[in-house]
Amino acid sequence: MNDHKGMTLIVKTITRISVWLIILYGIYIILHGHLSPGGGFAGGVIIALAFLNYLLAYGRKETENWINIRLLHDMESASAILFLIVGVLGIALAGSFLANWLSKGEMFRLLSAGTIPILNIIIGIKVCAGLFFVVWTLAIFHIEEAD
Amino acid sequence: MILYILCFILLLIGLYGVITKRDLIKIILSLAIMEYAANLFLILFAYKKGGRYPILEEGKEIVAMVDPLPQALVLTSIVIELGITAMLVALAVRLYQKYNTFDITKIRRLAG
Amino acid sequence: MIIPYLIIMPLLAAFLITLISGKGDTWGVIFAILTEITMILLSVIGFVLTRGNPLVYNTGGWKVPYTIVLVLDSLSGFMLIIVHVIALFALMYSVAYIRHLSKSWKYYALFMLLITGMDGVILTGDLFNLFVFMEIALFAAYALVAYGNRPEEFEASFKYAVMGSISSTLILVGIGITYSVTSTLTLANISQVLAKQPPYVVNWIGAIFLVGFGLKAAAMPFHAWLPDAHSSAPAPISSMLSGVLIKALGIYVLIRLVFNVFGFNPLFSRVFLGLGTLSIIAASLLAISQWDMKRLLAYSSISQIGFILIALGIGTRMAIFGALFHVLNHAIFKGLLFLNAGSVEMCLGTRDLNKMGRLGKVLPVTTGTSMIGTLSVSGLPPFNGFFSKVIIIIAAIEAGFFSTAGVAVVGSILTLGYFMKFQRYGFYGEKVIEKIAHKPGLGMRAAMICLAILCLVTSLLVIPQFRIMIMDPVVDVVINQANYIEMVMGR
């Protein structure tokens, strides 16, 4: 259909600015998961949509230069292993799986509630990598079939 | 009460779509409608009359809140359905590659 | 304790395989087989530790009604041993078989996810946690059915995925209704609250869950996905799906829900008897007319599930022992038969019974073990199928269900009929086949021989010493509803 170069110049210019704003918004939702609605999954989806925005606006080749696909693949598996390590540390330090082994801090502060912000960040990375990979695989697949 | 009946009708619409439609993509979309109806049903059960959103905030006193547990269940359920839809779409793409059609009456090599 | 490790270890293995593997599958094979051997050891230790009292584990450090509780009692230990033994043999078989399809580590990662899902379903004591782990296992199953990239596999996997999703949506609606009545999700607590409700509430909730989980267990009339999915999948996946998945996700959950949570009343008994009778007769008649080797085995799975359902429907102590014994036996001999069909398909390149011939010279191990498997499933002594079917028929006659006993006898005769067709056309046909494309590898032959030996060994479970030691605690758990509730809620 097109020559895989993405969309017009106006879209590319705006995307170059707005992608970072979307990523910032996603990070805000992930970090405040224990204080307001959202958390790991919703923030991860937002960051994945930021990457998807870049993919739609710039095309496949530029996205491969901008995001390191192998690093994303390794980060996805590594974050799942980190989640299990946090759970097993719960067994070792506090008695049962996924127990809260950090101190709980005061209420309503950013660094409170024990292991919950850490788990939110891990889930955010995993969801972002996973969802982007699904879209990336479907995008790549279309090329091999058309040739 | 009306809300529950409407939610049930949405479930039946989704079920009707899965059973009778012939296009693969329409089957996937009808399945998504059915799953939305199930999620809506779970959230409807969590409502208490006059309840507030269940978030503890600084400075506000604690009044009756709606039940937060079904909301956590619905969050997990949405994630699962995202995965299922992704897998069904990937299968539909591969089916198109092998059979060159999206029509399920023509994709019938297995019978009997 | 060891309970959370039974779920953590396969999950860790799945993601480690994804992280470490490069292009080939050596790391995948090494991790998978090491993990499986460890899991067998852990589950045997678990089963021995729970003689008499369940082990209960609260995750997250919370107290009982607010936590996700993992329960390991004798029934769970029994199912765990079945799952892991069949998984180890399927893994040994698939090393050579999957290399023939594609040299990739993805199969082993998906297989470990399947094991995680099934372990989670068997161990959990919380209703929504059961739903989540069931979905994990089903994801891996849908992806593994479509693993070989043939067109029939995609069609079968699509059909399986759509039907599985419909039943999962129904189960979610059922969970919603249960939560609104009881406002708790722990199974023991639900059982306590539902005991005080009027009976029509329990019957409606039971109906929704029976339809939902009955589709997972492939009872008729919800069986339509099984012949396609189990015949198109690669052979070790067929044996895992047909031998273990429909039992761990379907029959085990039905036993937990109907016997331990809802309480076994005559309405459930009649429904089980009806579904079971329909499954035996209809599936046996459909199996006789099949010319595709694996499709015949898939229909035979449906009819054996019918046997288990009528045994559960009868509900006496001897009938439940027969049902659980038949679960164990069916896992072993159906796993063996699917592995045989897979090795015939790999060596001859076809699954059509008309095109095969006398295979005794080129595939000796396959022919011998398939004869042992056929004799087991048809119910001839001294193999294990004979004992479990006889126990079910005797239990039916003792409890007064004479027509059900008649149906079981007719089903056994029909099973003998179509398996004679399977043997005669598949292995003892007219033309003598001299050369084949590939020979089965060492792992494949070892797995088939081990499963055939297990067919003979498990028939020793009828001897009273072994039965009292191994199977009686399991039957006690099923029948004794109050004990389960008190053990979980008392912590």
Image (cartoon, rainbow, N blue to C red):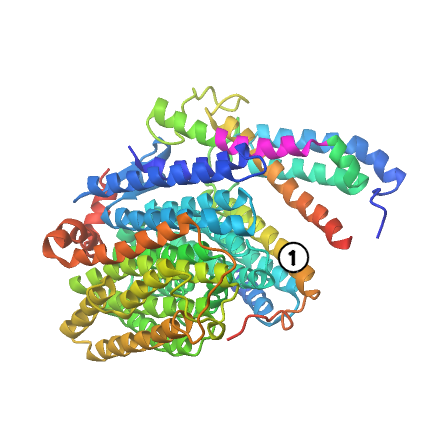
Q: For the residue labelled by badge 1, is the local secondary structure a helix, a strand or a loop?
A: helix
Where does the magenta region start and end? A67-82
Image position, residue B77 (x, y; %):
51, 49
The answer to whether residue A68 is magenta is: yes
The image position of residue C142, as x and y in percent, is 51, 55
Residue B79 in view (yes/no): yes
Indicate the chain on which mark 1 is placed: B
Looking at this view, is C409 or C484 the one in front?
C409
From what the image shows, is residue A20 above or below residue C442?
Answer: above
Whether C269 is among the magenta residues is: no
Residue C132, compared with residue C284, is above or below; it is: above
Q: Pinpoint residue C155: horizontal percent, then vertical percent.
A: 58, 63
Q: Quick one: C70 or C429, which is closer to the camera?
A: C429
- The residue sitting at the right extreme is A9
In the picture of the structure, the residue carrying the numbered disc 1 is B94
Residue in view at x 47 percent, y 20 percent: A106
Report whether residue C262 is seen.
no
